[in-house]
Amino acid sequence: MTEFSVDEKVHIAASFLLESPPGEVNDVFNDIRTLIGDDDALQAGILTSLEDHNTEQLITVALPESETEVIISKFGQLEGGRFADPRSKQSFAFDHMRLVRYTTWNRSGNMPYPTLRYMHLDFAYKWCIFRAAIDNEVQAYVSDHYPHGVTTVHGSGSKVTIVIVDNKYNPSNYWYVLFFVRVRSITSQWNGRWRAVWEVEKGGSQLKGSAKVQVHYYEEGNVQLNSTKDFELDISSEQDEKKAATSIVKAIEKAEKEYQMAINENYTELSENTFKELRRALPYTRNKVDWHKIFNYKVGNSIVNK
């Protein structure tokens, strides 16, 4: 059998990390760490993959002097590997291996790198009012519809990007709910994540976005749900920042609700019809067969026949 080199193993391990289910990247890392057996090579080889995973999965982190968390994403990434939080006007470094922030600086602080002074955020321009107005509306929307939701709203030029994420990790009781409608409660082992990104131009009449749902069930099995939906919505072009922000968030709420309801309907169809057709029918006695004792059944039948 071909023996893989350490570099080849690390390359394979990096792909495993990128495919980690929500909230399980540490479990995957610990498993591949045991398989590779070389911590130095592993950490050096997977750092880029961890950065890609964290920014793509919209990991959140708490900042000092801020009541809300901020989302780690490519939209808030600055030079030098730092990230920006427009709401609290802070930038910070982030340890992708340990998932913690460090060396946080606010806008008025002593920042050793001039290029990190929120050049792409341009707080002085008028469209900053537009970003802040959207931020206020989105915060209210997320707080009302997402139990564990976090949002960060970024601005660049005349474009505003809205990022929303909600994570739900529950090893015992699963509420089958996509934030609007709770359908039922069952016992299951699962992790799940909702991600949404929306972009709009100031004064524009079109809102573009995408939403992604990923759920991993691992109770006596291993099943994943991955769903993605892209949106292109027409909105009214408002010059007033407050009215424009309200119109944008209403459009987002309507689109996300329709998408979530569609997933609910598909899930119900799978559960009540499709999966039933795949299951083995019960025997005539209507009792489940203990397949571990099937040999005993055969022996018993042989004795009876003799």
Image (spheres, rainbow, N blue to C red):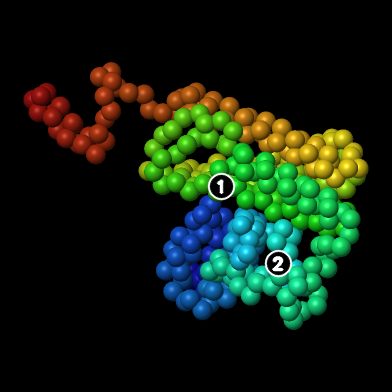
Which structural element holds mark 2? strand
Label 2, label 1: how far apart the Cα atoms are: 23 Å
Q: Quadrant of the N terminus?
A: bottom left
- In front of the other: 291 or 128: 128
Mark 2 and mark 1 in contact? Answer it, CB < 8 Å: no
Q: At 14% across and 33% down in the image, what residue appears?
A: 299
Crowding at dot 2, Cα within 10 Å, few <14 / some 14-19 / many 20+, comes out as many
Residue furthest to the bottom in view is 112
Q: Position of residue 212 (x, y in %)?
A: 64, 44
Residue that badge 2 annotates? 90
Q: Position of residue 133 (x, y in %)?
A: 79, 48
Vertical comparison of 282 with 16: above or below: above
Q: Position of residue 232 (x, y in %)?
A: 80, 38
Q: Which mark is residue 184?
A: none
Residue that badge 1 annotates? 148
- In front of the other: 257 or 29: 257
Q: Position of residue 151 (x, y in %)?
A: 67, 51
Displayed quadrant of residue 65: bottom right
Label 2 amino acid? Gln
Which structural element holds mark 1? loop
